[in-house]
Every structure is written in structure tokens, then in C-alpha cells.
């Protein structure tokens, strides 16, 4: 599986159920990367999507602890085991985990590649992603040139899990 995440310099991802920053090029990269694949997210992350709707051009799966939760244009799973059962037969290379914090924590152990947009700024935050730079299990394999969006500097990074 793959994970896609935007983090600040402290590996923060959100505050009060909101994204820390919105970068149009980051959004386009997410859409291009996931096209034709399977996207997994929680219901709060879905609410942050444009008009709170599932992504286009991919299969959307929502992991929610509520068995009754349903949304048009997406499949739902109320547990990790139910989600994994629905993914049976799907190539792990076609699966993208897109947040939020609890979904990342549950699925990061299944991921081999991480696409990280690293924002060179620190925000007030209450949600975090594992710091892959400090992890012995991950290695950064690619980093883009410096990107800018108004006063925001950021980089697109790719990490690979180190298999021992």
C-alpha cells in the first residue's frame, strides 16, 4: 500500500478537524497519483474534500467505526478487518491511504511507499503523522526541488519502507 500525506516541519497534519494548509499543486498531485486506484480515508477526511464528496476517477473506501455510516460514491468499512476483506484481490500498489490520523495509524504498517508533501512551516496542530525521518523503518528516496505557493515553501518527498 501507499500513503499520501501533507505534513508541516513537525509532522503535524491537522488542527481541530481541519487541514493545516491547502496547496493547489498538492491537491493536483493527489488526484493524479490516485487516478484509477483505491483511496482509503476516514469520514472526517472525506468531509474536507471539495463539497465533502469522494474523489473522482478512483474507488473510494471510507473507514469509519460506525456500521451505519454511508456516503454516495464510496464504499464503507466499519473495521480494519472489514476493510482488508474488501481490498482482497486488489494490488497493494494501487491502494492509497489518505488520512486522517487514526486511519494513518491503522494502515501505515501495511504501507511500503509514502508520498509526503513537506511544508517548511510550523502550525498549531493536534493531529500528527509518524516522523518518517526519525524512523529506522523508512528511507527518503526522492525529493523535489523547492516548490512555493505564495509564502509557503514545500517539497514533494517519496519514502520507501526498509525491509530487513
Image (cartoon, rainbow, N blue to C red):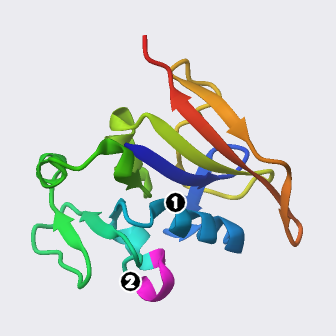
State the quadrant of the N terminus: top left
- The answer to which of marks 1 and 2 sits earlier in the sequence is 1
Element at badge 1? Answer: helix
Element at badge 2? Answer: loop
Viewer-side residue, 42 vs 159 = 159
Magenta-drawn segment: 48-52
State whether the magenta stretch is mostly helix, strand or loop. Answer: helix
Q: Name the residue tied to disc 1.
A: 33
Looking at the rendering, which quadrant does residue 10 occupy? top right
Q: Name the residue tied to disc 2.
A: 53
Determine if the magenta segment contains residue 90: no
Determine whether, in the image, residue 145 is placed left or right of residue 82.
Answer: right
Residue at 18%, 78% (x, y): give it. 70
Determine whether, in the image, residue 80 is placed left or right of residue 105.
Answer: left
| Image position, residue 102 (x, y; %) | 36, 51
Q: Quick check: can you spot residue 23?
A: no
Circle 2 residues within 10 Å: few <14, some 14–19, many ≥20: some
| Image position, residue 22 (x, y; %) | 67, 72
Determine whether, in the image, residue 28 is placed left or right of residue 137.
Answer: right
Is 72 located above or below residue 127 in the figure? below
Is 101 located above or below residue 141 in the figure? below
Mark 1 vs mark 2: in front? 1
Amino acid at each position: 500500500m501507499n500513503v499520501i500525506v501533507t505534513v508541516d516541519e513537525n509532522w503535524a497534519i491537522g488542527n481541530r478537524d481541519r487541514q493545516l494548509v491547502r496547496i493547489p499543486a498538492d491537491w493536483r498531485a493527489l488526484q493524479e497519483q490516485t487516478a484509477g486506484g483505491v483511496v482509503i480515508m476516514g469520514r472526517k477526511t472525506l468531509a474536507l474534500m471539495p463539497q465533502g464528496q469522494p474523489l473522482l476517477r478512483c474507488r473510494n473506501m471510507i473507514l469509519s467505526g460506525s456500521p451505519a455510516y454511508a456516503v454516495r460514491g464510496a464504499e464503507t468499512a466499519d473495521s480494519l478487518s472489514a476493510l482488508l476483506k474488501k481490498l482482497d484481490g486488489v494490488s497493494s500498489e494501487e491502494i492509497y491511504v489518505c488520512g486522517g490520523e487514526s486511519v494513518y495509524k491503522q494502515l501505515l504498517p501495511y504501507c511500503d511507499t509514502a508520498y509526503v508533501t513537506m511544508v517548511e512551516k510550523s502550525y498549531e496542530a493536534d493531529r500528527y503523522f509518524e516522523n518518517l525521518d526519525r524512523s529506522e523503518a523508512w528511507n527518503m528516496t526522492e525529493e523535489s526541488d523547492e516548490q512555493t505557493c505564495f509564502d509557503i515553501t514545500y517539497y514533494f518527498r517519496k519514502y520507501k519502507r526498509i525491509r530487513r
